Image (cartoon, rainbow, N blue to C red):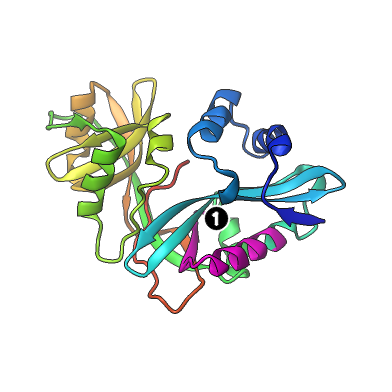
Amino acid sequence: MNIDFPKASQYPALKALWAEAFGDEESFIDLFFATGFSPDRCRCITINSDVAAALYWFDCEAEGGKLAYLYAVATAKAHQGKGLCRALTEDTHAHLKARGYAGAILVPAEPSLFAMYGKMGYQNLSCMNSFSCTAAGICDLRPAAPEGYAAARNALLPTGGVRQAMGISYLAGYAELYIGADFTLAGVRKGDTFIAMELLGNKDAAPAILGALGLKQGSFRTPGSKPFAMYHSLSESPAPTYFGLAFD
């Protein structure tokens, strides 16, 4: 077993692992590798020349310093149950700590994974809720470029909230970004429904947002009470207080 940064010759295998693990379409995977991927922000396990596990990260920051948002953590089906996820995560932690990162953040894809990552030293970082509503009224809603969206979102973050400049361009490749008078919004359309990945700020604007988008209904993820993100400290810096924008 070898854990290292990927070589260019391994990129097709990384894409194949992603497709197997998450079921995403080739176009979505290609988007990530074109706009979100860098080989120095990826660690992978190779066993007998096979890419058996991999993870990626985006740099972000909070008042405590530089952080890593771990993304698309995956183990090939043929190699599951061998402790590879733990080995890869621990290796990545050591690598990040050596490079001066204050901590690592991840968003478990399933409730059962909270316990698994808890055993690796992760603790709950922030909580979110989701609610659905129908359109009512219209509000001021402006499409935003990645830089403008990131700046407006940062202004609404609570003290200690995680700032996510890196990755917003990738997010903009498959999601819509908006700024309102007292909120920021990122999400995707599915038919006549809007799926908000994060509505930060005035959540009561949701029905009017749908009206402005010309859609009938939507679901919105907002700060709340359901465990969402987890944090693993790599330094003595204070832990962040909020992480709510997952690239799912």
Residue that carries the numbered disc 1 in the rendered image = 111
Would residue 173 be counted in the magenta stretch?
A: no
Rendered image quadrant of residue 97: bottom right
- The secondary element bearing badge 1 is classed as loop
Please tell me which residue is depicted at 12% across the width and 32% down the height of the picture.
140
Q: Is residue 99 magenta?
A: yes
The percent coordinates of residue 82 (x first, y second) are: 80, 58
Residue visible at 41% across and 62% down? 66
**Is the residue marked by circle 1 packed among few (<14), some (14-19), or many (20+) residues within 10 Å?**
few
Drawn side of residue 99 relative to residue 19, left or right: left
User: For the point 17% across and 33% down, which residue is it?
Assistant: 208
| 224 vs 88, nearest the viewer | 88
| Residue 77 position (above or below residue 118) | above
Is residue 195 among what the camera can see? no
With respect to residue 143, does 85 lie above or below? below
Q: Position of residue 176 (x, y in %)?
A: 33, 30
Report x, y in % for residue 205. Answer: 17, 40
| Residue 76, visible in the rendered structure | yes
Q: Across the whole image, how many numbered discs are drawn on residues?
A: 1
Q: What stretch of residues is rendered in magenta?
A: 87-107
For the residue pair 163 and 136, the one nearer the viewer reads as: 163
Q: The N terminus lies in which quarter of the figure? A: bottom right
